[in-house]
Image: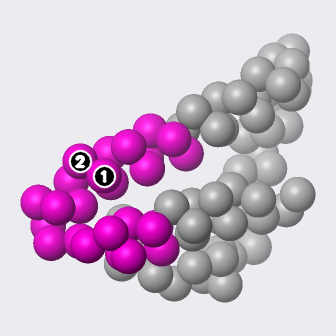
Amino acid sequence: MLSAARAGREDVSEANVAELAEIGETRAREGVPVEVVLWAWRVGIQLLIDRAREVGPVVGADAACLLVLAQSLLAWSDVGC
């Protein structure tokens, strides 16, 4: 996960965006309000960041690497917006 984050937003493919768009469309058809979908997305990003903070020191990731991960996750989550 940490190495993938180093690639940043530029490494997000059209297929990645299409897959996420399909998930959003499915939730809309299910009647899930967009606010709930966005909240769940935000919670998911926060859980990834929290887990990285736990695991990072174990695998030798320093604070700068974890910051890059957090920035990449936030940037990646904005793709298509």
Q: Residue furthest toward the front?
A: 63
Work out how far the residue at label 2 is from the one at label 1, CA to CA, in angstroms: 4 Å
Q: Does the residue at mark 2 contact the one at mark 1 (Cβ under 8 Å)? A: yes
Corner quadrant of residue 24:
top right
x, y percent for residue 37? 75, 29
In-front residue for pair 52/41: 52
In the image, the segment drawn in magenta is 45-69
Secondary structure mainly formed by the magenta segment: helix
Residue 63 is inside the magenta segment: yes
Residue drawn at 76 percent across, 22 percent down: 36
Say which mark, if any, is on residue 53. Answer: 1
Q: Residue at x 43, y 47 (%)?
A: 48
Quadrant the C terminus occupies: bottom right
> In the image, what residue type sits under mark 1?
Arg
- The residue lying at 45 percent from left, 68 percent from top is 67
Q: Can you tell which mark lies on residue 54? A: 2
